[in-house]
Image (spheres, grey):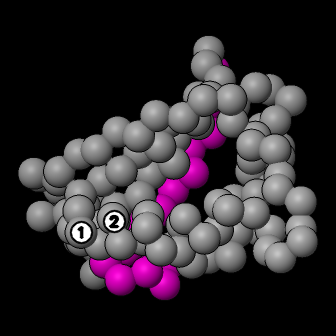
Amino acid sequence: MSVVKINVLTVPAEQREVLEQRFASRAGAVENSDGFEWFELLRPLEGTDTYLVYTRWRSEEDFRAWMEGPMKAAHQGGGEGAPRQKPAASGSTLWSFEVVQQAGPKGAA
């Protein structure tokens, strides 16, 4: 079964728009990564400053390969000579899960 990785980001109110814009303009490397299955950026609605970045992978090995390759490169700055951007999140925790059951809408094609 697949594995799910949820990056729990603490994002101050004044940085929310910055975070969302960065995700919206990201290079898209995750979508082209071997074993990648799904991505969602979840914005909190009330009572918290925590965003969740949900990704689903075919295997732990596929996730690790992405972390050590495309993700690492994307987070090392804006390229040769470009200034590195200040993080929008003030804290980050990674949660890991294995999918043991799943369901979709009945009657979906």
Check disc 1 and report the residue beneath it: 61
Residue 12, image x, y percentages: 76, 26
The reply to whether dot 2 and dot 1 touch (C-beta < 8 Å) is yes
- Residue 21 point in image, percent of width and height: 80, 56
Residue at mark 2 to residue at mark 1: CA–CA distance: 5 Å
Describe the element under mark 1 as helix, strand or loop.
Answer: helix
Q: Look at the image and give the residue range highlighted in magenta.
A: 31-46
Say how many tags the image has.
Answer: 2
Determine whether the residue tagged by mark 2 lies in a helix, strand or loop.
helix
Would you say 107 lies left or right of 40 here?
left
* Residue 62 occupies quadrant: bottom left
Asked if residue 13 lies left or right of residue 97, the reply is right
Q: Is residue 41 magenta?
A: yes
> Residue 50 location in percent, x, y?
59, 28
Q: Nearer the viewer, residue 69 or 31?
A: 69
Could you tell me the amino acid type at mark 2?
Phe
In the rendered image, the quadrant that contains the N terminus is bottom left
Task: Name the one closer to the observer, 43 or 91.
Answer: 91
Circle 2 residue:
63
**Quadrant location of residue 58?**
bottom left
In this view of the protein, can residue 24 be seen by the observer? Answer: no
Outermost residue on the top side: it is: 47
Q: Residue at x 79, y 74 (%)?
A: 79
Quadrant including the C terminus: bottom left
Residue visible at 69% across and 36% down in the picture: 89
